[in-house]
Amino acid sequence: MSRFSSKIKKAFAADGLLAETLEEFRYRPQQQQLAHALAEHSTPGKVLVAEAGTGIGKTFAYLLPALLSGKKVAISTGTKNLQDQLFFKDLPRLLPLIDSGIKVALLKGRGNYLCLYHLTQQLADPEAQTPVEMDQLIRIRSWANGTGTGDMAEMDSLAEDAPILRKVTSTQDNCLGKACPDFDRCFLKKARAKAMGADLVVINHHLFFADSALREQGFGELLPELNWIIFDEAHQLPDIALTRYGERLSASSFHYLGRDVRRVYKTLKDCKSLETRADELSQWADELTEAIQANGEPAWQAQLGFEAVSGAWQGLTRSLGLLKTELGYHLGRDELGDQCFERSARLMGLLEHFGSPDAKRIYRLERRERGFGLVSSPMSVRDELKALYNSYHCAWAFTSATLQVGGDFGYFSRQMALEKADSLILDSPFDYASQALMCVPRHLPLPHEANVAEHLAEIASKLIEAADGRTFLLFTSYQMMYRVGELLSHRQSRPLLVQGMDSKRQLLSRYHAYGNAVLLGTAAFWEGVDVRGRALCCVMIDKLPFVSPDDPLTQARLTACERSGQDPFAMVQLPQAILALKQGVGRLIRSEQDQGVLVICDPRLVQRPYGEQFIRSLPPMTRTRGLDKALARLREV
């Protein structure tokens, strides 16, 4: 045992540093074990993969060793919400305990920081704004005068997905860099400078891969030279890695290019044809969006077979080519104009890439409210990840509450090229047998049978009555969520909050405020949601969360598995579903005081041989098939 790991073990002891200084600290052997294991794996070349069950306190278990290590450390999270929690809540509780002058920083992607230049441009063009947007811009300007960080998350009055945010933040394409008149006041530049000088920087997974991409391209880096990288919510990494090692194209790319070209015209004033070409480009982007939305085909390769889609694609390609040529006539006259020329060249390359799909790549079409998105990724990123690990001379740690299936980390490790990593499984300290009851009701139809929604609504209605609201209904599809929500709206009077009615943050806020609400959600609410105490005492899940084989990422994994001669169901679909179910189940019990009932409305859990693998991977709750027992337990709670 090293001196450092011994010090960490003592800090988490029943009479250690945390017990002496934090009044709310409770000794947990699992937390001490995790912190000690992390400290033992803090030297370059060491790799640890650790599953830490809910309630262990893994946040402090990695933050304190990171602070005391004397190393340059990055903590990477899966969500911006956890980033903010670590930086604004958890670190301030630990830093006063350490008299060492450690510098910490929070760094997010550029789309999270206000761009003063773009704000000025939008305010100067009121005709391009709706009345609501103009009101938002004025409020943003007022906030900008007082903010020290420019982090748009500070503006609680704006939804996290408000369209106005795209207008007042920058992208890599439209950032003017040192040529920007507001460069000296740039919030993003200040955040990156602070991160470079920090001993510990809190980032997110997307930003980490963006940094690695910059390293590969020879453009420097966002992060300092690191000695230790710790990933929380590491179960999200495989999907993010596949997406980040790919190409992206969206309708908004063309609209933003057109918008900036119009600005160039307003500056130069003698090139009306630029404005005409920009308008044509936006029109073709809209036409392509309409053509894609007009059919329900999920596969991009199949979309290209539709005459309307291929015609709009060709029109967009011609229009972009003409715009690029026109911009070339004005090179050297305007900084933004030169940048638009470079962007048009990159977009031409992407149109060629997505217009001729490669059988060795995954193509994913994302339908959006105001456009579309295309993502192209390799079948596997194992080679890229191995190269990435070699590019950092540091220690690596991966932790989450859901990484292993039946005691095996193989599914996660294979995707992340971590077969040689040390592993650790630490069970939750909660007493699930007495705190929670799991029910798989009898006489349920199989998910593909008729009238499933009616059965789900009937069970949900009984649960809601017994629990007096205070229920999460988690679904694997929007279609089922909306159908059950509609049926419930006629059966009971408690507040129904359905995903899509508002932002996730605002829905959760309203759920707490009502006190007896019912929340219906899909994947977004299966993880990253922490509702403690009496506010949530029942979670119902509609069915086992097997991902459709048509899902492009799953399709790629199935194909790679088949090529290696392995069973795709056993090696991909089953472990993927088990990990997803563990996340959903984890919403119910969040503290030692919580009591509740979990209802899984899928008879395959008890009728299929693979059901036992699901049950073995779930917390050891008391189990029943009788819905009446579940209802009685809810009334007691």
Image (spheres, rainbow, N blue to C red):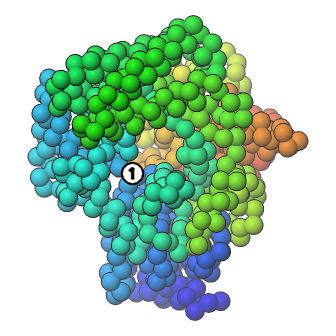
Q: Closest to the observer: 38 or 445?
A: 38
Q: Closest to the observer: 86 or 279?
A: 279
Q: For the N terminus, give its image quadrant.
A: bottom right
Q: Residue furthest bottom?
A: 3
At 42% from the left edge and 72% from the top edge, which residue is drawn? Answer: 200
**Could one spot residue 590 in this view of the protein?**
no
At 58% from the left edge and 56% from the top edge, which residue is drawn? Answer: 234
> Quadrant location of residue 96?
bottom left
Residue to which mark 1 is pinned: 109
At 19% from the left edge and 57% from the top edge, which residue is drawn? Answer: 185
Q: Element under label 1?
A: loop
Q: What percent of the width, then of the height, locates residue 580?
A: 62, 44
Q: Residue furthest top?
A: 307
Is residue 81 placed above or below 476 in the rendered structure?
A: below
Q: Closest to the observer: 599 or 110?
A: 110
Badge 1 crowding class, 10 Å Cα cut-off, few under 14, some 14 to 19, many 20 or more, is some
Q: Amino acid at mark 1?
A: Gly
Horizontally, is 200 left or right of 552 in the view?
left
Is residue 313 placed above or below 9 in the rendered structure?
A: above
Q: What percent of the width, then of the height, locates residue 215?
A: 51, 59
At 11% from the left edge and 52% from the top edge, which residue is drawn? Answer: 145
**Could one spot residue 257 in this view of the protein?**
yes
Q: Residue furthest right?
A: 565
> Quadrant location of residue 22?
bottom left
Q: What percent of the width, then of the height, locates residue 490?
A: 42, 18
Is residue 90 placed above or below 496 in the rendered structure?
A: below
Horizontally, is 383 left or right of 191 in the view?
right
Is residue 552 placed above or below 511 in the rendered structure?
A: above
